[in-house]
Image (spheres, rainbow, N blue to C red):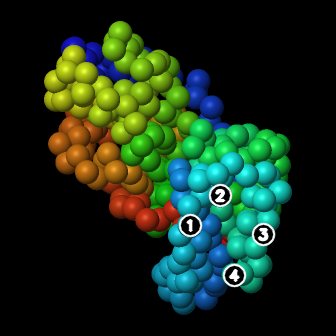
């Protein structure tokens, strides 16, 4: 396998063709002070909840943290059972303001709530499609950015891949992993860029022994760099401040360096910010702003 030159990936990438979903969230210039809100995180097979407290300097701390198996993961449940659990959690935490990081397909409404589209295959909740979540809802990429001070872009590079960015003051969820602009090989799992770089596909690709690990990382790093660079140009961002979350990025230093090297070759002005464990903080921010 031989990847294209970096400049070719940049030329092929069309950020205007991505979903570019509005979050209806506007990052504040100053962080909340002396506030406490309840934040929830529903993603993969886990449900997390905590109180997020902002001190008089705007620094966030996480308290009363609890983690459960995601409802509907162990056994299929009804939407009534799901919402009973959701509302009981709010009651247990005496929640008035709730922010929810929701890492499943959903339509974000203008009032900040969200309409469920579907859950992942691992989570079975019957009759949930179209139901509205009564909280300020955002996805994991948006939460990572919003929960990281100074970030104007966010990236998840773990089991999946996605980017978000600020344009005209609002955070936009690019759905970058669903890009189909780049050529694929016969051994790839499909046309999406996520299928060439995210953890759900990297390991199976490497195990096929069709291409070397180095070649697969090289192609993936070019795709990630091209999308970061292209989205920043599209959004009018001159200095990229990217909040980064995800196991693939942090567990593969070789890939980290390849991505940064490609951005250097493109002449990008960038800074990578640590977005790990910021989704609960981002959810809390969503409940306040």
Residue drawn 67% across and 45% down? 124
* Element on which disc 1 rests: strand
Tag in front: 4 or 1: 1
Q: Are marks 1 and 3 in contact (CB under 8 Å)?
A: no
Which is more N-terminal, label 2 or label 4? 2
* Element on which disc 4 rests: loop
Which one is nearer the viewer's eye here, 94 or 108?
A: 94
Q: Are marks 4 and 1 in contact (CB under 8 Å)?
A: no
Q: Are marks 2 and 1 in contact (CB under 8 Å)?
A: yes
Picture quarter with the C terminus: bottom right
Q: How busy is the neighbourhood of tag 1: few (under 14 within 10 Å), some, or many (20 plus)? A: few
Q: On the picture, is 185 further left or further right than 122?
A: left
Residue drawn 30% across and 26% down? 205
Residue 264: tell me if it is visible. no
Picture quarter with the N terminus: top left
Q: Name the residue tied to disc 4.
A: 93
Q: Name the residue tied to disc 2.
A: 71
Q: Which numbered marker is on residue 282?
A: none
Q: Is residue 124 above or below residue 280?
A: above
Q: Are marks 2 and 3 in contact (CB under 8 Å)?
A: no
Q: Name the residue tied to disc 1.
A: 68
Mark 4 and mark 3: span between their CA atoms?
10 Å
Q: Name the residue tied to disc 3.
A: 87
Tag in front: 1 or 3: 1
The location of residue 210, given as percent across then percent down, is 22, 16
Mark 1 and mark 3: span between their CA atoms?
15 Å
Residue drawn 64% across and 51% down? 75
Which is more N-terminal, label 3 or label 4? 3
Q: Is residue 32 above or below residue 46?
A: below
Q: How busy is the neighbourhood of tag 2: few (under 14 within 10 Å), some, or many (20 plus)? A: many
């Amino acid at each position: 396998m031989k990847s294209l030159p970096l400049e070719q990936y940049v030329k092929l990438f069309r950020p205007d063709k991505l979903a570019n979903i509005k979050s209806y969230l506007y990052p504040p210039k100053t962080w909340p002070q002396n506030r406490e809100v309840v934040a929830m995180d529903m993603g993969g097979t886990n449900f997390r909840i905590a109180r997020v407290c902002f001190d008089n300097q705007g620094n966030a701390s996480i308290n009363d943290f609890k983690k459960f198996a995601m409802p509907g993961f162990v056994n299929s449940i009804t939407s009534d059972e799901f919402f009973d659990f959701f509302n009981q959690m709010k009651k247990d935490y005496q929640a008035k303001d709730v922010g929810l990081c929701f890492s499943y397909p959903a339509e974000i409404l203008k009032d900040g709530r969200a309409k469920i589209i579907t859950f992942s295959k691992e989570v079975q909740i019957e009759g949930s499609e179209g139901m509205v979540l009564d909280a300020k809802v955002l996805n994991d990429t948006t939460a990572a950015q919003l929960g990281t001070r100074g970030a104007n872009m966010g990236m998840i590079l773990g089991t999946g891949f996605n980017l978000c960015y600020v344009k005209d003051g609002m955070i936009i969820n690019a759905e970058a992993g669903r890009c189909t602009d780049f050529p694929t090989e016969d051994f790839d799992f499909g046309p999406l860029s996520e299928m060439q770089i995210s953890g759900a596909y990297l390991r199976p690709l490497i195990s096929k022994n069709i291409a070397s690990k180095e070649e697969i990382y090289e192609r993936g790093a070019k795709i990630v760099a091209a999308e970061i660079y292209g989205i920043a140009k599209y959004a009018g961002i001159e200095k990229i401040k990217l909040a980064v979350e995800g196991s693939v990025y942090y567990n593969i230093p070789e890939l980290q360096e390849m991505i940064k090297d490609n951005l250097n070759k493109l002449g990008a002005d960038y800074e990578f910010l640590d977005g790990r464990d910021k989704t609960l903080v981002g959810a809390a921010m969503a409940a306040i702003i």
